Every structure is written in structure tokens, then in C-alpha cells.
Image (cartoon, rainbow, N blue to C red):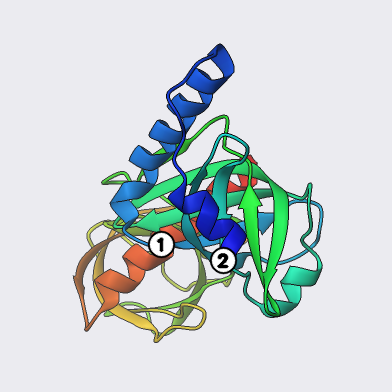
């Protein structure tokens, strides 16, 4: 830990070469990107070529010495992941807050132990990507999650479907079962239940915007939300952020 404290306390001298100036610009850009997330922000970590799930950690600070520079990361969670991550491991770091996603690829360049707890020093990112959740961002949910939906209206009772895509304002629902009657534009959905994984089901009302047949018995129902019960709207926003993070990971 003393090693990392020295890195945090000793600041970079004034640039005297092209490489040093470039490094200084990288650090300034990184500081601008992460300052909006506050002190010790939580960070998602995707380790390439390990088969590990998405890991979590905290960004402890930046090393800014003449000899060593980069990002200091806390121990990974779950703890067993620390055995699989070592020097030269490439990782993708993702920070998220209030609809903003910042991501960058780095490499683990040092691994130090504080007692039995590892701390990591990574390289500086060559590129920083910042994405803001668009007002009408439509997430391709079916690529990442299987989310069942139950639809009720005056004309339809307990129609089962699967969430195909979703935005803050509406959703596309894939229906595979046969229907006695099709859905009609402006039909009022009195109760829509979206069963999010690990969350309480979202209950809401909606209006049918479109209904069209696909291949075989499959149909796509497009709806616009009209009202939510409880914290349903917040749960949808959380799902959108989660999908955006998965899309960001898929790019890398």
C-alpha cells in the first residue's frame, strides 16, 4: 500500500519531452472524464479472454510519478477473480452514473498486495469513450436478457410475450402464441407486467402503437407507456443503463 500512496502523493514534474507532454494530456483527459463520478467511484471491469463475468472494483486514484503512471484499482469482486487477473491482463473499465457511461481499455501493469488484498496499477487509456443515454434510446434487450411479459386489456387476457426492445417511453414485445384477435392501434393495455431479473416486476399501463406479423406465428407488438406503478419508471431506466453497458462491452 505504501507503494501506491507514494504514487498518489508524488506529482508529475513539468513536461520536458513529447512523450511526457502526451502523457500529461492523457492524464488531464482522464481526470475530466472521471471527476463527475466523485471520489473512489465504483467501476465495472471486463477482463478479456478469461471467461469471467463482469467484475466490480473501485477506482482509488491516478498515479502521476515520473517513473510510474496510470489508474489505481481496488481489489476485484468477487474475490476469486483476483487469482485470474495478473500483470499484462487487458481489461475494459466502465463507469456509469445518471445516464452517462464512460469506458476505456487498459492493461494491468502492476499488482501489489496490501496484506492479502491485491491492488492494481493499470496503463493509461489511449482512448476514452463517453456516451450519454439518449432521451429516446431504444435498448435491444433480447440480445442480453430474456424478460417475460404478460399483457392484459379489455380484448386480451394474460397474453404472454418477451421483451424485444425498450426505451423510456415504450417497448417492442415479441408474441409467439396464437391469438384469437389481433391487437389494434390505440388499444388500451390496462395491465402490463414486465418481470425484470432480480427486481420486483414492473407494473404499468400502456397504449398499442403497432402490431405486425413476423415469421410463422410470431408477432411484434409496439406499445407506448402511459403510467407506472411504484418505482417502475426507475426500474426501466436501470434496465436501459444495464443494456447500454452490455452494448459498450460488446464493442470491445
Residue 158: quadrant of the picture: bottom left
Q: Quadrant of the N terminus?
A: bottom right
Q: Residue furthest top?
A: 18
Q: Quadrant of the C terminus?
A: top right
Q: Which residue is mark 1?
A: 41
Residue at image location 80% in from the left, 70% down from the top? 83
Image: 188 above or below 93: below
Q: For the residues marked 1 and 2, what is the alpha-carbon distance in whole angstroms? A: 10 Å
Image: 94 above or below 194: above
Residue at image location 54% in from the left, 14% down from the top? 17
Q: Is residue 206 left or right of residue 119?
A: left
Q: Is residue 53 left or right of residue 1?
A: right
The tally of labels here is: 2
Q: Is residue 81 left or right of residue 20?
A: right
What number is the disc on residue 74? 2
What number is the disc on residue 124? none
Percent position of residue 48, x then y: 75, 51
Q: Is residue 208 left or right of residue 219?
A: left
- Viewer-proximal residue, 209 or 202? 202
SS category of the residue bearing label 2: loop
Amino acid at each position: 500500500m505504501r507503494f501506491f500512496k507514494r504514487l498518489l502523493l508524488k506529482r508529475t514534474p513539468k513536461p520536458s519531452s513529447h512523450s511526457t507532454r502526451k502523457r500529461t494530456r492523457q492524464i488531464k483527459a482522464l481526470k475530466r472524464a472521471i471527476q463527475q463520478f466523485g471520489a473512489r467511484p465504483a467501476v465495472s471491469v471486463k477482463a478479456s479472454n478469461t471467461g469471467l463475468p463482469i467484475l466490480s472494483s473501485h477506482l482509488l486514484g491516478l498515479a502521476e510519478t515520473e517513473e510510474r503512471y496510470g489508474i489505481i484499482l481496488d481489489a476485484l469482486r468477487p474475490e476469486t477473480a483476483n487469482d485470474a487477473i495478473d500483470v499484462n491482463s487487458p481489461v475494459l473499465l466502465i463507469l456509469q452514473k445518471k445516464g452517462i457511461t464512460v469506458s476505456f481499455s487498459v492493461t494491468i501493469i502492476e499488482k501489489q498486495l496490501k496484506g492479502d488484498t491485491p491492488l492494481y496499477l493499470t496503463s493509461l487509456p489511449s482512448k476514452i469513450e463517453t456516451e450519454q443515454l439518449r432521451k429516446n434510446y431504444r435498448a435491444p434487450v433480447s440480445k442480453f436478457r430474456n424478460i417475460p411479459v404478460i399483457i392484459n386489456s379489455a380484448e386480451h387476457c394474460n397474453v404472454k410475450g418477451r421483451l424485444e426492445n425498450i426505451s423510456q417511453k415504450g417497448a417492442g414485445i415479441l408474441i409467439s402464441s396464437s391469438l384469437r384477435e389481433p391487437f389494434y392501434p390505440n388499444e388500451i393495455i390496462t395491465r402490463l407486467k414486465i418481470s425484470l431479473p432480480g427486481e420486483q416486476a414492473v407494473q404499468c399501463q400502456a397504449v398499442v402503437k403497432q402490431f405486425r406479423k413476423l415469421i410463422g406465428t410470431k408477432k411484434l407488438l409496439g406499445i407506448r407507456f402511459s403510467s407506472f406503478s411504484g418505482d417502475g419508471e426507475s426500474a426501466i431506466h436501470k434496465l436501459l443503463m444495464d443494456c447500454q453497458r452490455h452494448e459498450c462491452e460488446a464493442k470491445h
